[in-house]
């Protein structure tokens, strides 16, 4: 409870923390009593409270949220006064006006014959104006291709949005002309995956694209050069979680794989110049054997996209140079 000096008890603060009241740091203001910078914002009561001593710093905070309440998602959508946020993965960013295909007015009544003819003409010109320029037509085709590739590869919405931003920077800046739209879209998806630390191989992209590996690679190099992007170097650890998930292996195998790769980086010449996918695949194969989770080289090859010969070669190098014992569980941290 709040006392005469505006002090809130420690028990009340603890209850507030349990109820999920937001705790944050306010660097520009400090508590006049204890000098602490951490404050608690109680949006329901409109109070700002010091997290150190419990002093109520402000009790007239304005609530910037909506004045209505909603208890279901449908009710929230019906009462909301705003539309969907802007989306870079849509060629018009989702901000264009759509004319409904139903010939009904706002009250649900049917249009007359003259009104239907007018709406038909308006609907036709609205579709034309959405793609009235070559840039709009280019973006419409490219965003459709990026959406298709992202769906085929199982990419997250954030990766799809990042790929769309890269493509827009390239096209809107007039840095790219007379190039294949499909190859450029595939290169943007590949660049977005590498840039966000969730790499996919060019072979995986080409498998679902209408263009070949060689053309996608050439467009990727030109995209990186034009946009002046510094791409991080792919490491084997980036591929491990995805491979483990697709192989349906337990977390112990992933932990052991990470330990094997960490030790492999300490050995000179074992990681440098090697395909990170091959190293990740071989390390998973070793870790699976050490944790008695049998998985075939063919299964790992199908998931990773590297050949069984490569997996065997990297497997022999890891076992010999790291002196791994295959009969016992991995205790690499103590090795």
Image: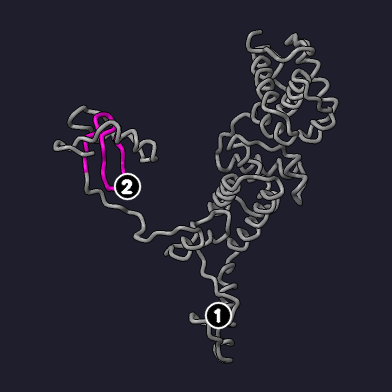
The quarter of the picture where the N terminus appears is top left
The percent coordinates of residue 276 (x first, y second) are 70, 27
The percent coordinates of residue 151 (x first, y second) are 68, 50
> Nearest the camera: 302 or 235?
302
Circle 1: is it few (<14), some (14-19), or many (20+) Cα within 10 Å? few
Residue 170: in sight, yes or no? no
Residue 318: in sight, yes or no? yes
> Nearest the camera: 260 or 138?
260
The percent coordinates of residue 85 (x first, y second) are 48, 57
Q: Is 288 located above or below residue 90 in the figure?
A: above
Q: CA distance from mark 2 to mark 1?
A: 46 Å
Magenta residues, start to end: 39-58
Q: Residue at x 55, y 74 (%)?
A: 99
Contact flag, marks 2 and 1 (Cβ < 8 Å): no
Say which residue label 1 marks. Answer: 122
The label shown at residue 103 is none
Say which residue label 2 marks. Answer: 43
Residue sitting at the far left:
4
Q: Residue at x 75, y 15 (%)?
A: 318
Q: Residue at x 43, y 59 (%)?
A: 70
Q: Is residue 287 left or right of residue 2?
A: right
Q: Is 46 located above or below residue 25 in the figure?
A: below
The quarter of the picture where the C terminus appears is top right
**Residue 158, quarter of picture:** top right
Residue sitting at the far bottom:
113
Q: Nearer the viewer, mark 2 or mark 1?
A: 2
Circle 2: is it few (<14), some (14-19), or many (20+) Cα within 10 Å? some
The disc, 2 or 1, on the residue closer to the chain's N-terminal end is 2
Q: Is residue 185 magenta?
A: no
The percent coordinates of residue 125 (x first, y second) are 57, 77
């Amino acid at each position: 409870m709040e006392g005469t000096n505006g002090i809130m008890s420690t028990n009340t603060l603890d209850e507030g923390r349990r109820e999920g009241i937001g705790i944050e740091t306010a660097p520009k203001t400090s508590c006049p009593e204890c000098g602490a910078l951490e404050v608690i914002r109680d949006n329901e009561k409109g109070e700002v409270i010091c997290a150190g001593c419990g002093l109520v710093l402000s009790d007239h905070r304005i609530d910037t949220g909506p004045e209505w309440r909603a208890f279901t998602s449908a009710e929230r959508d019906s009462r909301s006064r705003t539309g969907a946020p802007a989306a870079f993965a849509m060629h018009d960013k989702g901000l264009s006006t759509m004319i409904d295909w139903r010939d009904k007015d706002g009250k649900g009544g049917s249009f007359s014959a003259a009104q239907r003819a007018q709406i038909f003409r308006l609907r036709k010109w609205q579709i034309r104006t959405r793609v009235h320029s070559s840039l709009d037509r280019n973006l419409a085709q490219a965003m459709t291709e990026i959406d298709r590739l992202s769906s085929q590869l199982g990419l997250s919405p954030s990766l799809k949005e990042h790929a769309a931003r890269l493509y827009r920077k390239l096209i809107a800046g007039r840095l790219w002309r007379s190039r294949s739209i499909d190859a450029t879209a595939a290169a943007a998806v590949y660049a977005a995956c590498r840039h966000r630390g969730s790499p996919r191989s060019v072979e995986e992209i080409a498998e679902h694209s209408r263009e070949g590996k060689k053309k996608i690679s050439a467009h990727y190099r030109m995209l990186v050069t034009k946009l002046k992007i510094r791409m991080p170097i792919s490491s084997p650890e980036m591929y491990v979680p995805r491979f483990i998930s697709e192989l349906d292996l337990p977390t112990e195998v992933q932990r052991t794989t990470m330990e094997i790769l960490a030790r492999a980086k300490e050995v000179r010449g074992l990681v440098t110049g090697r395909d990170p996918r091959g190293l990740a695949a071989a390390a998973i194969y070793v870790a699976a054997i050490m944790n008695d989770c049998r998985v075939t080289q063919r299964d790992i090859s199908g998931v990773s996209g590297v050949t069984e010969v490569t997996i065997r070669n990297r497997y022999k190098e890891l076992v010999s140079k790291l002196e791994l014992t295959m009969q016992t569980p991995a205790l690499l941290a103590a090795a």
